[in-house]
Amino acid sequence: MELSIAHRFRFEAARRLPRLPADHPCARVHGHGFEVELEVVGPIDPELGWVTDYAALAAVWGEVAGELDHAYLNEVPGLENPTSELIAVWLWGRLVPRLPGLAAVSVMETPTTRATVRRERRG
């Protein structure tokens, strides 16, 4: 049996979306309280009764969060056009080598919006 678990994290950052028309509100510098959800899939460890320790997720998140928290995202290498979709892909690239079983990374810039990158399903 395989199960998924997820943990949400938060960071605050400013950005502008430089490829939008000048009259679009997101073309101007603005900020968000972003939420990031990391989903890990795997078997339940028969001894511990869990897929992985939530503290392990937090530790890996901590390794990359400092690059984003209270940053101007356009100045982060690789995020010159920091849409939520591209932030999710950027995070995936940094987290997947550190988190075995990473299945999805979601970025929420508001409570009603979400961009998600998922591991490709095999078979």
Image (cartoon, rainbow, N blue to C red):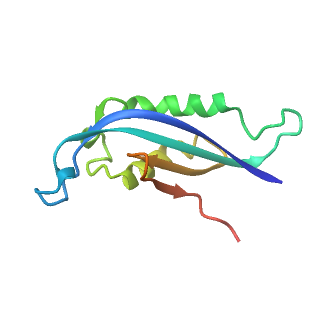
User: Vertically, is 51 above or below 48?
Assistant: below
Kindly indicate the quadrant of the structure image that contains residue 72: top left
100 to the left or right of 69: right
- How far from the left and from the top, in percent, is residue 74? 25, 43
Horizontally, residue 97 falls left or right of residue 53, namely: left
Residue 12: image quadrant is top left
The quadrant of the image that shows the N terminus is bottom right
Q: Position of residue 115 (x, y in %)?
A: 44, 55
Residue 65 percent location from the top left of the image: 44, 32
Q: Residue furthest front?
A: 112
Determine whether, in the image, residue 15 is placed left or right of residue 2. Answer: left
Residue at 31% from the left image edge and 47% from the top image edge? 79
The quarter in which the C terminus is drawn is bottom right
**Looking at the picture, how far across and down is residue 119, in whole percent?**
59, 58
Q: Residue furthest left?
A: 22
Q: Nearer the viewer, residue 94 or 37?
A: 37
Q: How many marks?
A: 0
- Residue at position x 30%, y 39% in the image: 76
Tell me what residue is drawn at x 23 percent, y 52 percent: 17
Q: Give the residue at the far right of this rendering.
A: 47
Q: What residue lies at 53% left-to-right and 43% top-to-bottom?
A: 37
- The image quadrant of residue 22 is bottom left
Asked whether, in this view, residue 15 is left or right of residue 5, the answer is left
